[in-house]
Image (tube, rainbow, N blue to C red):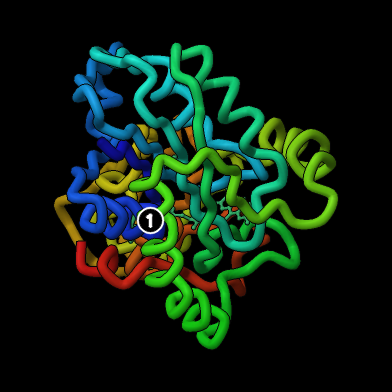
Amino acid sequence: MILYFSSTGNSRALATTLASHLGDKAVDMVPLLDAPAVPCELGANEPLGFVFPIYGWSLPDIVRTFLQRLRIEGYNHQYVYFAVTCGDDVGVADRPIRRVLADAGLHLDAGYSVCMPDSYVCLPGFDVDKPDEREEKYSAFGPRVKEIAEQVKRRAVVMDIKRGRFPWLKTNVLGWYFRKYLITDKPFRTTDDCIGCGKCVSVCPLHNITLEGQESRVKGQEFNIQWHGHCTGCLSCYHHCPTRSIRFGKRTEKKGQYLYPERRQL
Ligand SMILES: Cc1cc2nc3c(=O)[nH]c(=O)nc-3n(C[C@H](O)[C@H](O)[C@H](O)COP(=O)(O)O)c2cc1C
Ligand code: SF4
Ligand code: SF4
């Protein structure tokens, strides 16, 4: 079983491609989060994979919450691995991931990372990838997933991740500050271009957004979009908005949007 979380679609693509190589099933964590506990049954020789994006050189809070609620039935030291997507590198994210899995009663055997187009845009100097960078990552994606699938089939015990430079500092100092102070929905606002389509409301994995005035879809009409303080920082609302009218303070005015191609059709 592969349990995945994805905002802009990269990790979903990784989970479903990996599942097809392994003859496994990919299950979205988000709908399961509506229940206070998540029971999952594992077969005797079935590997258990967790696929999600890296946020601030660590795991997203939404994945942490999911793992805290997960109740695996039939776990008898089957192969447990994570496969994460990142724009650049993951630091020492394997350490918090290993700890959270241990708290859930699971022993981590392996970890893999895959570089995919960047979705983070909320700080100066951070933007979506240029088309040539994006295409380069897409061309490496297929062979990389095949390589990971081969290792999972062999039940390889490895930490095959791209740590980058100063990995400890990134996860434990920069990342700690980032996750504590910059994962927030306080700066979100909308511009007059909002057409009240409700996409931001429907794509938020935490039901954190409400919209009033949805019945009249006229550009320029005032819509009351509210964020309610339970944000995991995934930027799904920002990237899915068809009129680019969601802003994160003043920092995203000139920034781009990104969605994995399949995700654009949702
Ligand atoms: C809040 C946030 C933090 C991020 N932090 C990192 C990071 O620390 N390192 C990195 O390489 N990419 C980082 N990224 C980029 C994502 O990990 C990357 O684009 C990922 O593939 C997105 O996955 P998804 O399309 O499944 O949502 C971050 C993205 C967001 C939204
Ligand atoms: S997705 Fe964009 S246009 Fe649609 S309601 Fe939300 S902010 Fe408005
Ligand atoms: S409010 Fe936006 S950034 Fe926050 S969790 Fe919802 S979709 Fe993600």
* Residue 141, position as x, y percentages in the image: 43, 70
Q: Where on the image, by quarter, is ligand 2?
A: bottom left
The quadrant of the rendering that contains the C terminus is bottom left
Helix, strand or loop for disc 1: helix
Q: Residue 197 in the image: x percent, y percent? A: 24, 58
Q: Splitting the image into 4 quarters, where does residue 193 fall?
A: bottom left
Residue 225 visible somewhere in the drawing: no
Q: In front: 243, or 136?
A: 136
At 56% across and 46% down in the image, what residue appears? 54
The one of 234 and 218 positioned closer to us in this rendering = 234
Give the left or right position of residue 21, taking residue 239 as reference. left
Residue farthest along the bottom direction in this orientation: 132
Q: Which residue is mark 1?
A: 150
Name the residue rendered at 24%, 14% in the picture: 74
* Left or right relative to 51: residue 256: right
Report the residue at 34% width, 17% height from top.
70
For disc 1, the neighbor class at 10 Å (few under 14, some 14 to 19, many from 20) is some
Q: Is residue 258 visible?
A: yes
Q: Position of residue 140 (x, y in %)?
A: 47, 75
Placement of 181 over or under 126, stated as above or below: above
Left or right placement of residue 1 versus residue 99 in this view: left
The residue located at (54%, 87%) in the rendering is 132
Q: Is residue 141 above or below residue 175?
A: below
